[in-house]
Image (cartoon, rainbow, N blue to C red):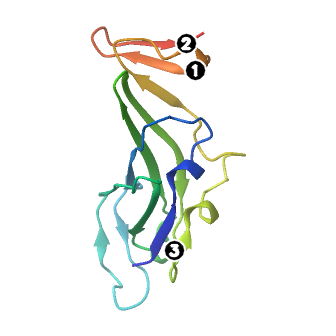
Amino acid sequence: MPIVTGNVFDLRSLPMPGAVPNIIFHLEPVTNVTATGSGKGNVYPTTAYPVVPDSSGAFQVNLTATSGFHADAWYDVELVWNTPAGTLRDRTLRVKVPGGGPHNIGDLIDQSAGVGGANQLLVWVSEIPPVSEAKGQWWFKPSTNDLYRWE
């Protein structure tokens, strides 16, 4: 399994002072079958690979190479920032993982949907609105199930 390394602070342009997120790699939500090598025919379920970066934001994770699957596959990368004011779930990137390695995550980011990755949607999950610097960000209030765009 290839090793993917990186720093979480290279994945997000907005700083989150005092917060280091958990990272969760989600294999694309379809069952994948290995096409080549000794693992030919092995089925890989849609599983999550959680990663806890160190205090500097550095991380490494062993992932299954997506290049060996029958179907075109990728990992969705989710950052979960837990702060006293609420939780920000940032699922803005997806990566394809070739064999070999190690690989830096910055070299694996899928740009097929345009500059910055496949999905630039951020949702702040909290009972209180995001800070004023977060204008334009989406905000979900769990107690009312309302979704707002913070202006």
Between circles 3 and 1, the one closer to the viewer is 1
Residue hosting label 1 = 134
Between circles 1 and 2, the one closer to the viewer is 1
Proximity of marks 3 and 1: CB atoms separated by less than 8 Å: no
- Residue at point 66%, 46% (across, down): 113
Quadrant of residue 14 in the image? Answer: top right
- Residue at point 29%, 62% (across, down): 45
Q: Position of residue 130 (x, y in %)?
A: 48, 17
- Amino acid type, mark 2: Trp
Between circles 3 and 2, the one closer to the viewer is 2
**For this rendering, which residue is in front, 35 or 58?**
58
Proximity of marks 1 and 2: CB atoms separated by less than 8 Å: yes
Which numbered dot is residue 150? 2
Q: Is residue 18 left or right of residue 112?
A: left
- Amino acid type, mark 3: Ser
Gap in Å between the C-alphas at discs 1 and 2?
A: 7 Å
Label 3 sits on a secondary structure element that is helix
**For this rendering, which residue is in front, 151 or 117?**
151
Q: Is residue 3 left or right of residue 33?
A: right
Quadrant of residue 48 in the image? Answer: bottom left
Residue placed farthest to the bottom in the image?
Answer: 38
Label 2 sits on a secondary structure element that is loop
Position of residue 46 relative to residue 138, above or below, is below
Q: Position of residue 118 (x, y in %)?
A: 60, 45
Dot 3 or dot 2: first in sequence order is: 3
Q: Position of residue 60 (x, y in %)?
A: 43, 67
Q: Position of residue 24 (x, y in %)?
A: 37, 51
Dot 3 or dot 1: first in sequence order is: 3
- Residue at point 60%, 58% (across, down): 109
Crowding around mark 3 (Cα neighbors within 10 Å: few <14, some 14 to 19, many 20+) is some
Residue hosting label 3 = 67
